[in-house]
Image (cartoon, rainbow, N blue to C red):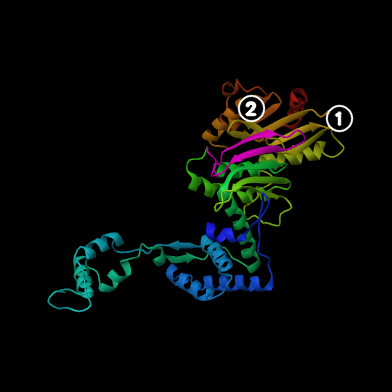
Amino acid sequence: MLTADLVRPRLRLKGVSLSVEHLEPTPPHLKTAADLIALFAGHLGQPQGKWDAALEAYEGHRTDYILIRGLAKVLEDSATFAPLVTPIEPDALRAALFTRGPVFDRLDLFHQQTRADVVAAVATEFDLTPEQIESTLFADRPTAYIMTDAGDAWTPESLIARYNLELSRGVLYWSSQMRVELHDSYKDFWRYLKLFKLMFWATPRPDDGYNIHLDGPISPFVKATTRYGRQFAAFLPALFLCDRWQMTADVRLPDTGKQVQYRLDHTSPLRTHFKKSGTFDSRLEADFAAEFEAKFGGERGQWLLTREDQVLLLGDTVMIPDFALTHKQDGRRALVEIVGFWHPEYLNRKIEKVRAAGRRNLILLVYEGVNLTADRLLQVPGEVLYFPNKPVLKDVMSAVERAAE
């Protein structure tokens, strides 16, 4: 992620409204991005120190050095730099060398050993060559790390797009709270919320969707500020997986301490590199939806099947049932969760969530092979249907008619 010194120059303030001056893909900027991509790729297999020197030489006396360093940082974060494999730990080697005392260029009465003498003596002690001593001495320093993977297959356009995203991520380092108004793609949102271990509370909106409040890294409730701040900023691309949303972050400017607000919504040109989840999590779910569409879809039935359109808020976690069925005339709804091929720990969490939800209109479709016997589901408030191979749609629809509210 971009460091603060690379983010601050791109911030713009109007009253209490904060914005980021994103980089436009103009021909000069595209050329700079292309130059850096080529220069970086040319250092594959080289020490990081050589890349640093090449970048400094490219930067020269250019006045847009903030831009150059920012684009370079995006390239570096995508790449892999690995330490050298050495015959001895570098710190042990340094200790062996430095305990032999000072060394000098020339010998005289008061200067009894040269650097070459000490290197040769330590090489003999560890059964190494002087060349191995030299290559190992500072091999654990980042400048000696070797670029083993240059990272993403960048184009000038994609590099600029990621740079702009990283600028917006950087703003969130100084956020105390984020408020999100979310109207769709609930599963992806909460999947990444859980992945980055962010603290939140959520409430349903009166129209549709949810209001979610997230504690930021400078919130008084956050202790591990640096680590949490990186996770908080890293979460931002998850918003761009959603079709309709708004975000407002309360930000305290690092230089002045002024409280401002940073806003984004689904109309932003920023692009995400996060992967969107598939339409279905399993073949069971896909087959269930296809069979429903074939038999009850369109104008043929009284029920509308939707995928993961409701979130059950359960304190510090959520449950998103696989399907919802809504009656086209009276609006009654039933929720359907398919419990298929999962490991025991997952099943235990699933049961706990179902019990915590306490929804009588939540129907569990349980595969007989998962070892969820009836006695383990005694406290489940909704209906439970078992199936040997696939859910029997006729039985499911009967349960929907009974359970819908």
42 over 18 or under it: above or below? below
Nearest to viewer (mark 2 / mark 1): 2
**Mark positioned earlier in the residue sequence (2 or 1):** 1
Instruction: Give the camera-side residue of 386 and 127.
Output: 127
Q: Find the magenta span and give its range.
A: 196-220
Local SS, label 1: loop
Q: How many marks?
A: 2
Instruction: Give the camera-side residue of 160 and 216.
Output: 216
Could you tell me which quadrant the N terminus lies in?
bottom right
Q: Which residue has dot 2 on it?
A: 357
Local SS, label 2: helix
| Residue at 56% from the left image edge and 64% from the top image edge | 70
Q: Amino acid at mark 1?
A: Gln
| Residue at 62% from the left image edge and 49% from the top image edge | 236
The image position of residue 268, as x and y in percent, is 71, 54
Q: Is residue 384 left or right of residue 109?
A: right
- Residue 47 visible in image: no
Q: Which residue has dot 1 on it?
A: 329
